[in-house]
Image (cartoon, rainbow, N blue to C red):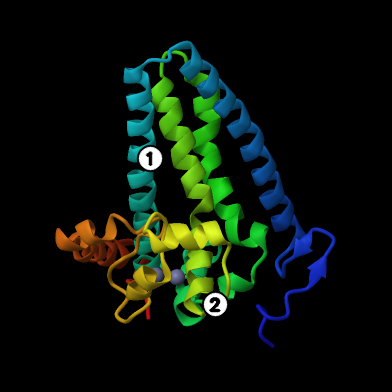
Amino acid sequence: MDEATETPRRWLGEYSYPTGHRVIELVAIVVWVGCTAVLAARVVVAAADQRSVLVAFGLVAAALAAYLVADVASGLVHAVCDNLGSVDTPVVGQKFIRSFREHHTDPLDMTRGDFVRVNADNFLACLPVVIPVLLWVDIDQHLFVGTFVLALTGLVIVTNQIHKWAHIARIGEPVPAPVRWLQRHGVILSAEHHEIHHTPPHESHYCITSGITNPFLTRIGFWPVLMRGCRVVGRRFAGSPAVAE
Ligand SMILES: [Zn+2]
Ligand SMILES: [Zn+2]
């Protein structure tokens, strides 16, 4: 039976993994939304207090930097999960590596998952960034840091959804009109751009937020170096230099 097409509907949504896992995902989403709302409010208040042309320029620059960093970060995580370790690697094997490896054999599986299943891991991954900033960074003093973190984590949590939309568009299924516009203008990952990664040997174009940094990283030969590093580390520690099919 295809687990993806037969996902059972339960009281916490449609999922086929343990309910304890689902509860953790939902808690991560609620905590992230709460923390981000407070952080956003602090950024807005500080920006209003300090408003000037220079501050406006700094806010835009911080957001643009986050846009680029989010894309590179998505590529790094994706490339490492595709090329280092295996599904048997302790802690991260089943939770993270498995979904990346299976994505190459069944790219449409993620299009069948509900919002929580597709996006919860990224909410979880952002908590160790958002919570310390909320607790220990004075946003009045570090407005651009707050803006950067707000934009970065906001982009990270929508990355899997953007990836999912690229695959939905690839099979000709409808996506929301604003999403289609953003895809067409290269603001977020498009189906055509992401198809390059899904074409064997799957060794480039790992970035999946906007994909805007893929041409540059490919041109400077970043991916072969990273994959060589993964193979060296894999041989040394895991004995499994697994490579995407
Ligand atoms: Zn991949
Ligand atoms: Zn994909």
- First of labels 1, 2 by sequence position: 1
Frontmost residue, 113 versus 124: 113
Secondary structure of the residue carrying numbered label 1:
helix
Badge 1 vs badge 2, beta-carbon distance below 8 Å: no
Instruction: Check mark 1 vs ligand 2: CB closer than 8 Å? yes or no.
Output: no
Mark 1 residue type:
Ala
Could you tell whether 171 is left or right of 185 in the image? right
State which quarter of the image contains the N terminus. Answer: bottom right
Horizontal and vertical percent position of residue 152:
44, 40
Image height of 35 relative to 87, above or below: above
In the displayed orientation, state which residue is furthest to the bottom. Answer: 1
Q: Which residue is mark 2?
A: 108
Instruction: Check mark 2 vs ligand 2: CB closer than 8 Å? yes or no.
Output: no
Q: Residue at x 80, y 69 (%)?
A: 9
Q: Residue at x 37, y 44 (%)?
A: 67
Q: Residue at x 14, y 58 (%)?
A: 220
Q: Quadrant of residue 19?
A: bottom right
How many labels, in total? 2
For residue 147, the mark is none
Q: Mark 1 packing: few (<14 Cα in 10 Å), some, or many (20+)?
A: many
Horizontal and vertical percent position of residue 191:
42, 71
In the displayed orientation, state which residue is furthest to the right. Answer: 11
Q: Mark 2 packing: few (<14 Cα in 10 Å), some, or many (20+)?
A: some
State which quarter of the image contains the C terminus. Answer: bottom left
